[in-house]
Amino acid sequence: MNYLYLGKQVVVPDQNIVGIFDLENTSQSRITRDYLAKSEKKGQIVTVADDIPRTFIVCCDKKDRYTIYLSQMSSANLYKRLRENTEIKE
């Protein structure tokens, strides 16, 4: 099992990652804004950014519990790290 570092000493197992999303581009959609607002009300959002977040990462554990991490790292950088650590091929 490989892990992905998200910031602030937070790492997640790569197998738990559902998606890595650019916050600026995806938050233009009302559906995404509603999803993030509902997730925040449920306490599912964890901020691992010291600055303005650039990316949100949706993770699911074995008990089907979702956690959304807000990171200041770019989605491209996180995806590159994930691809380097696993055998994801384009």
Image (cartoon, rainbow, N blue to C red):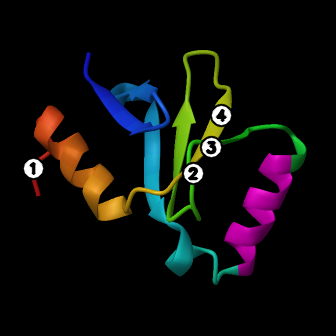
Q: CA distance from mark 1 to mark 2?
A: 31 Å
**CB under 8 Å between callouts 3 and 4?**
yes
| Mark 1 Cα-neighbour bin, 10 Å: few <14, some 14–19, many ≥20 | few
Question: What residue span does the magenta drawing correspond to?
Answer: 30-40
Q: Residue, x 55% and y 45% (percent of image)?
A: 58
Q: CA distance from mark 4 to mark 1?
A: 26 Å
Q: Say if residue 6 shows up in the picture.
A: yes
| Mark 4 Cα-neighbour bin, 10 Å: few <14, some 14–19, many ≥20 | some
Residue hosting label 2? 50
Where residue 14 sits, quadrant-wise, is: top left
Q: Quadrant of the N terminus?
A: top left
Q: Secondary structure at mark 1?
A: loop
In this image, 43 relative to 88: left or right? right
Q: Nearer the viewer, mark 3 or mark 2?
A: 2
Q: Nearer the viewer, mark 3 or mark 4?
A: 3
Q: CA distance from mark 3 to mark 4?
A: 7 Å
Residue 82: x percent and y percent?
Answer: 24, 42
Judged by its main secondary structure, the magenta piece is: helix
Nearest to N terminus: mark 2 or mark 4? 2
Is residue 48 on the magenta stretch?
A: no
Residue 69: x percent and y percent?
Answer: 58, 44
